[in-house]
Image (cartoon, rainbow, N blue to C red):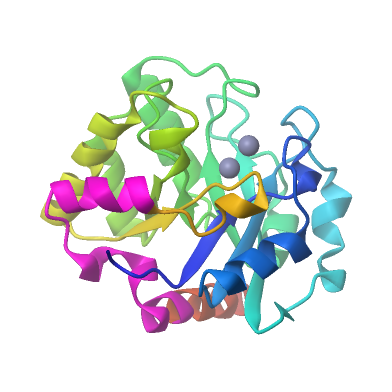
């Protein structure tokens, strides 16, 4: 099975429904041979989520633990139809990266067309880098349009391992279509665990199986190469420095 070098979608107890700390997640990441760990807790509007202060205090966040390089991002919610995000730009900009997502606890969503419009507006934000679980059937999307826009704007589509095992039942078919669109239109996917407990960190089995089923090319999986993943993260940090 394809080796992946980093996991950028991992939650901690700060999310309010996560069960591990940064430290615990990092130790499991190391034990599983990951070089890079990205903490992406939920944004404030998620029930039980952290306040904006959690993100503002980024200066305290460690850059590495036991040889695992750490990045501090967010899984930021879309809060309304206009694609408005749950954290202000000045905070998003100071984080290492942002994963944008829809959750029914925060935004009800609408038709396929409406959700697509909403997401495309959110993608206009330069501090959004990755689209979380785009295959979620609870928020149907026009995959052709979304992938096209992601490619045009250099955003990454996530294939979320938890969507095949823990949550968001019915995601697989949609994720297969997203993978096929990426093969046709170009762009990248990133495979993430969406761990809410440390032992889930680096769990990618179901997502990789699905990608194999559609003969997805490994070169288009961002975290299948440590060089590509590191370059991506460097580019984001550079963008934030210049922005
Ligand atoms: Zn969550
Ligand atoms: Zn998540």
Query: Is 81 rendered above or below residue 63?
Result: above
Residue at (79%, 46%) from the top-left corner? 13
Q: Position of residue 76 (x, y in %)?
A: 63, 44
- Quadrant of the rendered image containing residue 185: bottom left
Q: Quadrant of ligand 1?
A: top right
Q: Please state if 193 lies on the left or on the right of 143 as rendered.
A: right
* Residue 148 seen by the camera: no
Relative depth, front residue between 242 and 49: 49
Q: Position of residue 174 (x, y in %)?
A: 26, 32
Q: For the magenta stretch, what is the residue range?
A: 205-230
Secondary structure, magenta segment, majority class: helix
Q: Position of residue 77 (x, y in %)?
A: 61, 37
241 w.r.t. 99: above or below: below
| 243 inside magenta stretch | no
Give left or right: position of 123 versus 56.
Answer: left
Q: Residue at x 60, y 79 (%)?
A: 242
Kindly identify the residue that appears in the image at 49 percent across and 29 percent down: 167
Give residue 22's position: percent from left, percent from top: 75, 61
User: The C terminus lies in which quarter of the figure?
Assistant: bottom right
Instruction: Locate residue 218 relative to residue 32 in the image: left or right.
Output: left
Whether residue 221 appears in magenta in the rendering, the answer is: yes
Q: Is residue 2 visible?
A: yes
């Amino acid at each position: 099975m394809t080796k992946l070098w980093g996991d950028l979608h991992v939650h901690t107890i700060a999310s309010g429904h996560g069960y591990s700390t940064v430290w615990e997640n990092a130790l499991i990441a190391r034990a599983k041979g990951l070089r890079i760990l990205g903490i992406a807790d939920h944004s404030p509007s998620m029930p039980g989520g952290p306040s904006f202060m959690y993100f503002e205090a980024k200066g305290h966040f460690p850059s590495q633990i036991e040889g695992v390089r750490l990045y501090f991002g967010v899984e930021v919610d879309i809060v309304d139809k206009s694609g408005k995000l749950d954290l202000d730009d000045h905070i998003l900009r100071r984080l290492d990266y942002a994963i944008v997502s829809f959750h029914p606890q925060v935004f009800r969503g609408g038709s396929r067309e409406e959700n697509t419009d909403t997401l495309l507006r959110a993608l206009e934000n330069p501090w959004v880098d990755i689209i979380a679980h785009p295959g979620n059937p609870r928020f149907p999307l026009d995959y052709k349009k979304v992938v096209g826009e992601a490619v045009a704007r250099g955003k990454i589509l996530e294939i979320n391992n938890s969507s095949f095992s823990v949550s968001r039942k019915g995601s697989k078919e949609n994720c297969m279509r997203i993978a096929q669109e990426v093969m046709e239109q170009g762009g990248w996917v990133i495979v993430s665990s969406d761990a809410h407990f440390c032992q889930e960190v680096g769990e990618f089995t179901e997502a990789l199986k699905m990608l194999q089923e559609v003969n997805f090319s490994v070169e288009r999986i961002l975290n299948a190469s440590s060089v590509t993943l590191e370059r991506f993260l460097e580019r984001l940090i550079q963008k934030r420095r210049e922005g």
